[in-house]
Every structure is written in structure tokens, then in C-alpha cells.
Amino acid sequence: MSKTPPPRVEVDAPEADAFDADRAPLWKRLAWMAAIWGASVTVLGAVAYLLRFWLKG
């Protein structure tokens, strides 16, 4: 007895609602990357500063 695999379900997002990142200009994608990187560095620095302040007393 061989088992048959379950049927595949294909999910397609509506074309009008889906945002295709490849269509965005390069400058916009780079700006988002820089903004996310800058925010993460800022938050990491703030957490490190608070930990240092808390541990030094």
C-alpha cells in the first residue's frame, strides 16, 4: 500500500493588493534599509546605555 501525498494548495495574493518589492525604486529600498538599520543601532545603543547606567549605579 502506497500513500498518496496530500493535495497541494496554491495561495495567490490578489495582484492589486500585493506590493511587489522589485517594482520599488532602488533608492527607496536602500532608504528603508538604512532607516531600519539606524533605528536598530539607536535602540541597541539606548539599551546598552541604560544597562550601563543601571549596573554602574
Image (cartoon, helix red, strand yellow):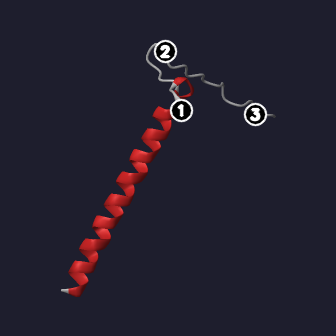
Q: Where is residue 40 in the image (x, y as percent from the top left)?
A: 38, 56
Q: Earlier in the sequence, mark 1 or mark 2?
A: 2
Q: Name the residue under label 1.
A: 26
Q: Which of 53 and 25 is in front in this view?
A: 25
* Residue at image point 53% right, 32% down: 26
Determine the CA span between mark 1 and mark 3: 48 Å
Rendered view: 4 above or below 35: above
Rendered view: 38 above or below 29: below
The three-letter amino acid code for the residue at tag 1 is: Leu
Secondary structure, mark 1, is helix
Closer to the eye: label 1 or 2? 1
Determine the CA span between mark 2 and mark 3: 34 Å
Q: Name the residue under label 3.
A: 3
The three-letter amino acid code for the residue at tag 3 is: Lys
Image quarter where the C terminus lies is bottom left
Q: Mark 2 points at which residue?
A: 14
Q: Where is residue 50 in the image (x, y as percent from the top left)?
A: 24, 72
Q: Which of marks 2 and 3 is nearer the N terminus?
A: 3
Instruction: Give residue 51's mark.
Output: none
Q: Which of marks 1 and 3 is nearer the N terminus?
A: 3
Closer to the eye: label 1 or 3? 1
